[in-house]
Each structure stands twice: as structure tokens, then as C-alpha cells.
Amino acid sequence: MTDTTGRRWHDMGGLDAGPLDPAEHDFALWEKRVDALMVLASAKGLFTVDGLRRALEDMGEEAFESMSYYERWIASVNQNLLEAGVYSIEELGARMEDISKRGTTYSEAANG
Amino acid sequence: MPHDHTDHLSPSGHPFRPDNDAPLTYWQVMEIAIRELLIVKGITTAADIAAQIDAMDARSPADGAKVVARAWTDPAFKARLLANGSAASREMGFDIGSLRLIVVENTPHIHNVIVCTLCSCYPRNLLGLPPDWYKTRAYRSRVVREPRKVLAEFGLVLPDSIRIRVHDSTADMRYIVLPARPAGTEELSEADLADLVTRDAMIGTGLPKAAA
């Protein structure tokens, strides 16, 4: 989002928005793992919280509306790890293809 | 399969519920792949990841509640907590990391509320992971402009004589609310007092429970 104020989409304090939805959910195992990967990769110096946020903000408003919180986080973690040279996009693609063949649920694909 | 923005949507176009038994999503596959790559490359181990999740699961609003109850019963501790939230929390054995933790005190005239308008910064070291609503557009956008109305949507209606202060967090600087000690709790132990302190009381969207 670009407007004459120079405000980016994530800078939403004070804007109009709808009613609060107080619903909460327990975090799924895969979401907790995303959080843990962020903390561990940061502790290893592979990227910082600023790097995480930069990729999240660059994803734009559409991602904020269409992806869940930890979906955006894993996309940002991936972007940062690719930039850090931890693995290549080819390595990631090949592994994701293998994982997709393991089953149709998370536990099957994750082997637990 | 090439990625596009509909992979994680159901045939009806809605996101899948985040249950553990939902069909495998593109982003879950990515999480598994990244985790396995980090392990294969020796950057982390499955045990480290499990330990990190255990540490995160062990954190809950009960940690923040212990800090609040200590502040209610020990004036010297309260003074140290308001002067330096990180150091005082560490005194009680809580790992605050490198964050600057700022404790804001409710008084008969001031009610404090915390938010992160830019993202989802939260005092997770004392409260655990933030509730879903804390990360929503509705909360982030509106609580800084019409806090009284937002608090009413949480069921908290404050008299006009109480001023509301909203504190906007950043990645490196987190706020937590020190609620006022409920009336009629003079005889309660520190542990019993901690049981009255809810998560929302420390966010500012609620008040402590009344004494039983």
C-alpha cells in the first residue's frame, strides 16, 4: 500500500478496522516448530528479528490478509535463510517435493 | 508443485483451520523441509528444537502473575521493577533475554494498555505467546485511537475519570501492565495473589480477578 502519507501497509496504528474477534487457538505443533526455528536460527546469528520483520513487511498486505501468522513467519524465515546461504532454493525445492510424497497429513509428512 | 497463493486454501477459498489433523499445507511442507535442512547441515538438532518448544510451552501468564504478586507484596521489589523491569524479573529467575522490559503501573487515575501496532511484539518472556487477537488488524489499528471502545468490546468498561494510556511496543522494547491490587486482598499470600492476576490484566484488556 502506498499513499501520500508514505505510510506502509503494516503501519496500521490508528486506522479504521472492524470489530475485535476475541477467538484464540492453541498453537499447532508445526507452528511451535516455526517459532523454535526462528529463535534457534537467530541464536546462531543467521539472521535477526529485524531481518524477520523486513521480509514480513515486504510480503505486503495481501499476504497479511491471506496467510496465517506462522505461514508468514516460515516464509520470512525461509527468505532470510536463503539470503544467508544456509541452503539453496534447489535444495529446498527437492526436499519439499520429497516431503509432499510422504503422506497427506502433517504427521505423515513430518514422520511424527 | 509450483507455489501459488491458493495452495493453502480449501476448495471453498477459505483457509484451513489450524488443527493438527487438517490436510497437509504448502507452508507446513516448507517448515518440515527447512527444519530437516537445518538438522542435515548441522545448524541445529531435533533435540534442540524440542527443547526450545518445551521452554516456550513452559512460559505462561503464570510467570508474569508471580512478578505482579511480588510487586504487590514487596514495595522495594516494586520500586526496582518500575525502575528496570528486565533486571527485577531476572531477580526472580525469569529469562528476559536482551529485551528492555518496561512495567507500567495502573493507578486509581490511570489504566494502561499494551499493543504492537507494527507487528506482534509482546512480553513473551513473562506471558508466553500472544493471543491471536493481539496480532489482528482490529486490535493493532483501533486500540491506539479508540481504546475505551476496544476495551468495552473485551467487556471492560472504565469510568471516564480514569485516563487510558496505550503503549506501543517495539521489537527491542516490550511493555507489561502492573495492575492494581484488588481490594480486600490484605490477608492473601503472594501465591494466592498471583492466582488473581490474569493474562489480560497484564495486557490491560482486563482487570485482576476479585478476591474470592
Image (tube, rainbow, N blue to C red):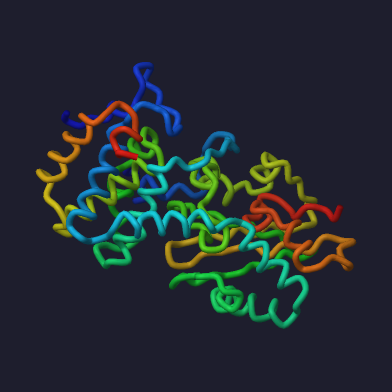
For this orientation, the residue located farthest to the top is: B12
Q: Nearer the viewer, residue A89 or B46?
A: B46
B157, above or below B196, in the image: above
* Total numbered labels placed on residues in the image: 0
Considering depth in this image, is A1 or B135 the residue closer to the camera?
B135
Q: Position of residue A55 (x, y in %)?
A: 28, 51
Q: Residue at the spot x=17%, y=57% of the render?
A: B41
Determine whether B24 is above or below A2 in the image: above
Q: Position of residue A104 (x, y in %)?
A: 30, 26
Q: Quadrant of the N terminus of chain B?
A: top left
Residue B13: give x, y in percent of width and height. Answer: 37, 20
Front residue of B7 and A34: A34
Judged from this view, the residue extending furthest toward the left is A90
**Residue at (67%, 39%) from the top-left corner?**
B153
Residue B40 appears left or right of B134: left
Q: Is residue A53 left or right of residue B88?
A: left
Q: Residue at x 20, y 32 (%)?
A: B3
Left or right of A89, for residue B53: right
Which percent across, then down, holds residue B176? 60, 63
Residue at point 27%, 33% (across, down): B26
Q: Is residue A60 left or right of residue B22?
A: left
* A45 or A7: nearer the viewer: A45
